[in-house]
Image (cartoon, grey):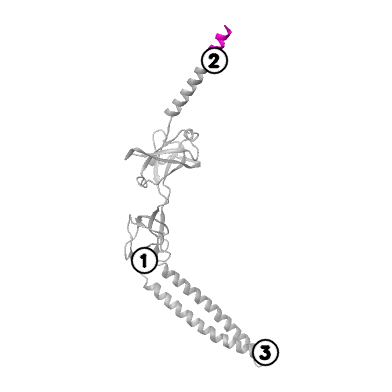
Amino acid sequence: MKRVGVLWCACVAAALCVALIVFKCWFCASDEIILNGNVEIHDVNVAFRVPGKIGEILVDEGSEVKEGEVLARLVSDTFSAKVKLAKAQLAEAETILINTKKNYVRFKSLMKNKSASEKAYDTAEAEYKAASAKVEAAKAAYEVAIIDLQDSELKSPVNGVILTRNFECSEMTSASTPVFSIMPYDHKQMIKVFANELALARIRPGGGVYVTITSMPDKKFKGHIGFISREAEFTPKNIETSELRADLVYRIRVIVDEPAPELKYGMPATVKVLNN
């Protein structure tokens, strides 16, 4: 009788364990975490370091470019003239330095023989030092003029593709104003999504996800959770849903593992968090 009771209890316990496992699997499968957001692309803004008039544009939107490739040029007449002027001023300063140095050396020798006054020697020394300083200043100005001439060519800092072109030929541009934006080939495509506190408890950095877009619902782009904000914020209007409306949510950055040309900047995307 006791054996029957023990066997019955064991069967009940086993049945409960199986039921618990089945329920847990069913719960996890049915309670999926689905997040909505938009595709983000980290582009590189490229600008001239000097202001000027754009004389030539060599690429357009969609053009593939290599690191160091010339994208555009400013009209260089002014920059070339500044180089010539700085070079002439340097030559003049060096000539003055040679003469003042000779005069200084001569007065220094005369001072040793007490054939010149201390005042005359001090004047010659001051003129020599001033001429030396002017040569250094002229050298610096010449180097700056050369750099400005070189910077009248805008080169790509990365291998990538031109996303936007903001200027046309003959337009004026100021220093640091973006002329192009480039999407680097080695960039990581990202999806910015938001999750409420309940969902956040089941999301971990590094966790796997699948990304889908409306135009290709059957294609899944594999990715992972890259960043979870520590600050709560109200749901942005562009991804607001009835469930999240007026809720405080946390910003999450999802990183797509492999380059996916199908994912365009700003495109709405759905992220399914995998149950690990």
Q: Say if the magenta span includes residue 113.
A: no
Mark 2 is on which residue type?
Ala
Q: Is residue 59 left or right of residue 32?
A: left
Element type at mark 3: helix
178 relative to 111 in the view: left or right:
left
What type is the residue that disc 1 sits on? Arg
For the point 48% across and 38% down, which residue is it? Answer: 207
The residue that label 3 is drawn on is: 112
> Residue 142, image x and y in percent?
47, 74
**What residue span does the magenta drawing correspond to?**
1-11
x and y, in percent, of residue 249 in the image: 46, 38
Q: Residue at x 62, y 89 (%)?
A: 107
Q: Amino acid at mark 3?
A: Lys
Mark toward the start of the polypeptide (2 vs 1): 2
Residue 3 shown in magenta: yes
The quadrant the N terminus occupies is top right
